[in-house]
Image (cartoon, rainbow, N blue to C red):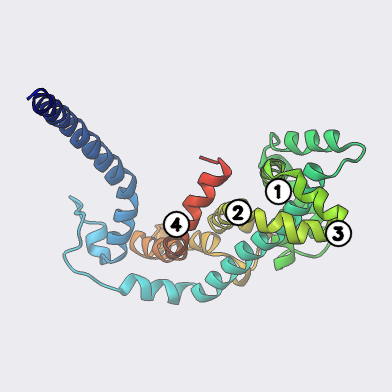
Amino acid sequence: MTTLAQHRTIAATNTRSKRTRDPVRWLYCAAFLVVTVALMLPVIIIVLTAFKPASEVNAFPPSLFPHQWTFANFKAIFSALPFGRLIANSFGFAGGVTLFALMFDSLAAYALARLDFRGSRILLIVIIASLMIPFQATLIPIYKIVSDLGWVNTFAGLIAPRAADAFGIFFLRQFFLSLPRDLDNAARIDGASEWRIFRSIILPNAVPALMTLGIFTFVNNWNDLLWPLVFTTDQKMGTITSGLTLLTGPGGIIPQGIMMAGALIAILPLAIMFLLVQRRFIESVASTGLK
């Protein structure tokens, strides 16, 4: 009887505890829903406005959903701009910067994390200090160098100045420091060179960090406006972000429907990429401690 009474007491306590947690859980869910809608509202407006005719875009009072769905904005943007070329340029620019940055950043990070050489600490301090220099302060000197090399309106001029990044070097260095040095020492005892250790031991163990840095680098360069706008004067060498700045109607008025159609096309590759790698991306962020 005593055991039965204890079971009943425990069950009653669990029931009361569950009833107490349920309202709190619903409150958390409602708060998350409100925050999600608030964050997604600009994207929802972009999508819906892209399918509105010009008469509805400029109508007052405005409506969220279009009364008449149309693809005229998408046809107009492809006729107003070489949009296919701009998309290809964006992939070439962002993809090229990502590949070179991962290669050079990982090499520099390996040297700073695993090799002992004179001046390594000073070099690390200089790299970290460079993060405090505003990008706008170095824009003109970099443009002067690129112009003297004759790389304006070329992929070399767009990619080369960003082929290495101080944040990427520091980020990968911190991850390389977390890897056990016993792996390096065992490989050196077996006669492996530094390049073999880097290629066969460090890089395979650093896939989460490389993936995280690669995604951030690609997204940042895909969305970048100022860099392509300064380093390209030819419309055919522009990217999506710089190409959208050329959209102006009569009297300098920006056609909002066409602009939203272009913005929707610009964010689609990033959205598709995130959907394809979201699980690995979340695992990478968690494993690198970037959260």
Reading the chain from its start, which is encountered first: label 2 or label 4? Answer: 2
**Mark 1 residue type:** Asp
Reading the chain from its start, which is encountered first: label 2 or label 1? Answer: 1
Label 4 crowd (10 A; few <14 / some 14-19 / many >=20): few
Label 3 and label 2: CA atoms lie apart by 31 Å
Reading the chain from its start, which is encountered first: label 3 or label 1? Answer: 1
Reading the chain from its start, which is encountered first: label 3 or label 4? Answer: 3
Determine which of the numbered discs, if any, sits on residue 279 in the image.
4
Q: Is residue 271 above or below residue 166?
A: below
Question: x, y (%) of residue 93?
Answer: 63, 64
- Residue named by callout 2: 217
**Mark 2 residue type:** Thr
Question: x, y (%) of residue 144?
Answer: 79, 53
Question: Does residue 199 appear in the picture of this structure?
Answer: yes
For the point 86% across and 53% down, the residue is 188
- Residue named by callout 3: 192
**Mark 3 residue type:** Ala
Looking at the rendered image, the disc whose residue lies closer to the viewer, 1 or 4, is 4
Residue 260 appears left or right of 48:
right
